[in-house]
Amino acid sequence: MFGLVRGLLSGAIVSGTPLLYATLAELISERAGIVNLGLEGVMLVGAVVGFITSVSTGSATLAVAAAGLAGALFNMIFAFLVISRRANQLASGLALMFCGVGLSALLGAPYIGSRISGLEEIRIPGLADLPLLGPALFAHDALVYLAAPAAILLWWVLFFTRWGLSLRAVGENPVAAFAAGRNPHRLQYQALVVAGILGGLAGAHLSVGVAKAWAEWMTAGRGFIAVALVIFSKWHPLRAIGGALLFGGAISLQLQMQALGVPISAFLLDMLPYVLSLVVLAVWGGKRRHAAPGSLGRVFQGTE
């Protein structure tokens, strides 16, 4: 029983880590007034570039850095379309997602079946040896340990810095922000750069941290789960931590039940995280609407 609990908790943390990075990526985009449905593609590009870099250099650190850079660059395609060209955000995001799926499959094809050492497990001295919870909480890779601090840092930036205040003002009312001397387009570009980096890190954790291998569409819809998590967290970075753990727990439960041979269809178990996403959208989508940025999804028609 204790082993099952420890496995569920450890699995929730590991599975929740890429979800948290992806949620933070979507959250900062939406705080700038932009809905990015292409996050799935950004994650896939980050995952494949990180894996290829790890195979080529043998360095997990370089792999993670390359994944973040690739995610930022790939997300700039979306930024150019929706900010500079004022294209529809939903259509552009979906197009970016499918582009990311195809590009990652093309780049990753020669590496299918390859294995890497990936990110090493870092055991916290003393704490990792605690009974029951020690291995579950204090024996993970660096990206796991950095995920919650990243959420705390984003919370501080958004709510306690001038840049964060300006970004949130753009998300609420870009016309008023422009009249107050802010540059909405510049702030949105900056937000999407950060979002691309976070999305790339989410993908890198899947390929370099968890699987230590490459597989086509290995994100398995996590980019869309992140959209639901942003709503669940009410566009707040700290609440995103709990949401990511909850959804990570659903993924972990699915894997644990399959490993134990529970007589439930594997297809039904695979549906569990996505059913939870639908529940979140159904329950929170309307009630918490007031928490969404006021100009979310709208195109700013002003000048640079």
Image: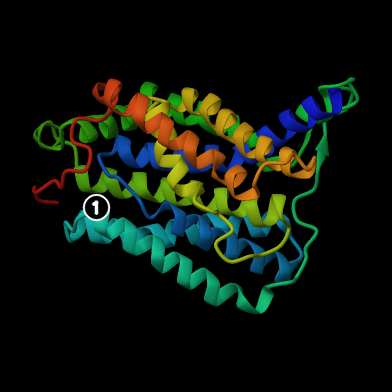
Q: Residue furthest front?
A: 263
Report helix, strand or loop for mark 1.
helix
Residue plotted at (51% across, 28% down): 243
Residue 144 rendering spot, x and y as whole percentages: 67, 38
Along the viewing direction, whichever of 62 and 127 lies nearer the viewer:
127
Circle 1 crowding by C-alpha within 10 Å: few under 14, some 14–19, many from 20? many
Q: Is residue 208 above or below residue 265?
A: below
Q: Is 160 on the left or on the right of 238, as rendered?
A: left
Q: Quadrant of residue 233?
A: top left
Q: Is residue 149 visible?
A: no
Q: Is residue 164 visible?
A: yes
> Is residue 265 positioned above or below 215 on the image?
above
In this picture, residue 272 sits left or right of residue 184: right
Q: Position of residue 151 (x, y in %)?
A: 51, 30
Check the image and name the residue furthest to the bottom: 110
At 53% from the left and 77% from the top, the residue drawn is 106
Residue underneath mark 1:
89
Q: Which percent across, then down, holds residue 110?
A: 65, 79
The image quadrant where one finds the N terminus is top right
Identified at 60% across, 55% down, the residue is 65
Front residue of 172/220: it is 220
